[in-house]
Image: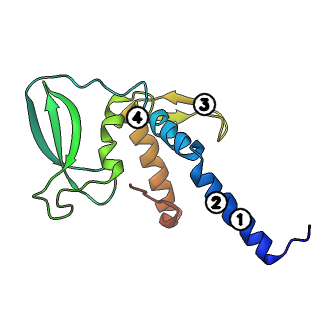
Amino acid sequence: MKITRRNFIASIVGGVVGIQVTPLPWKFTDDAAIWTQNWRWVPVPPTGEFTKETSVCNLCPGGCGIAVRKVDERAVKIEGRTDYPVNPGGICPVGMGGLQLLYNEGIRFPGPMKRVGPRGSGEFQDITWDEAFAILGKRISGLRKQGQPQKLAAVDG
C-alpha cells in the first residue's frame, strides 16, 4: 500500500479518535490522580473547632497572603487571604503544598550539614549552626579579599 498524504492524515485522525473513544486513557488519568494523592505522609485532619492564623507565604518570592486553618494547634489547611492585595483569595499549588513541607520529615531541612565526600557522592556530616556560619563567613571574606565578590550567588525561591 502506497502511503499518500490522504492515507497518512486518515490514519492519524483514526488513531486519535480511536484512542479518545476507548476507556484506556481515561482510566490511566483516573489512576494517576489516585496514585499521586495516596502519600503516606498525608495527615489525617483532626476534628473539632478550628481557628485561622494569617501570615505570608515564603515558599516563593511572590509573598502571597495565606490563612492557615488549625485544629487544636495543628495546621490542617492553607488558603489564600481575600483581604491581601497580592493574591486576592488565590494561592498557587506550591503554597497549598506547604503542609507537605511541615509534615513530611523526608524532605524537611534537618539543620546545617557539611559535605565530607566528593561532590555528588551524597556524603554529609551534621555540623552546628556556629560551625556553618564560621565556614560561610570564612569563604565570603576570602572572596572579598581576592576581589571576586561576583562569585557569590544567593538564590531564593
Badge 4 or badge 3: first in the primary sequence: 4
Q: Residue at x 57, y 46 (%)?
A: 25
Image quadrant holding the N terminus, namely bottom right
Q: Quadrant of residue 69?
A: top left
Q: Earlier in the sequence, mark 2 or mark 4?
A: 2
| Residue 85 vertical position relative to residue 54 in the rendered view, above or below | below
Q: Which residue is mark 1?
A: 12
| Residue 59, visible in the rendered structure | no
Dot 1 amino acid type: Ile
Say whether disc 2 or disc 3 marks the residue closer to the N-terminus. 2
Q: Secondary structure at mark 1?
A: helix
Residue at screen point 39% across, 29% down: 104
In the foreground, 123 or 23: 23
**Are the residues tagged 2 and 3 within 8 Å (C-beta)?**
no
What residue do we see at 31% from left, 41% from top? 98
Q: Is residue 121 rendered to the left or right of residue 90? A: right
The answer to whether residue 17 is above or below residue 108 is below
- Asked if the residue under mark 1 is in contact with the one under mark 3, i.e. CB atoms within 8 Å, the reply is no
Q: Give the Cα distance between marks 1 and 4.
A: 49 Å
Image location (x, y in percent) of residue 3 = 86, 71
Left or right: 57, with 107 as reference point:
left
Q: Quadrant of the C terminus?
A: bottom left
User: Picture coordinates of residue 89 (x, y %)?
Assistant: 18, 56
Task: Answer yes or no: is residue 46 visible.
Answer: yes
User: Are the residues tagged 2 and 1 within 8 Å (C-beta)?
Assistant: yes
Give the residue at mark 2.
16
Residue matched to label 3: 123
The residue type indicated by label 2 comes to: Val
User: Where residue 95 sits in the image (x, y, percent)?
Assistant: 30, 48
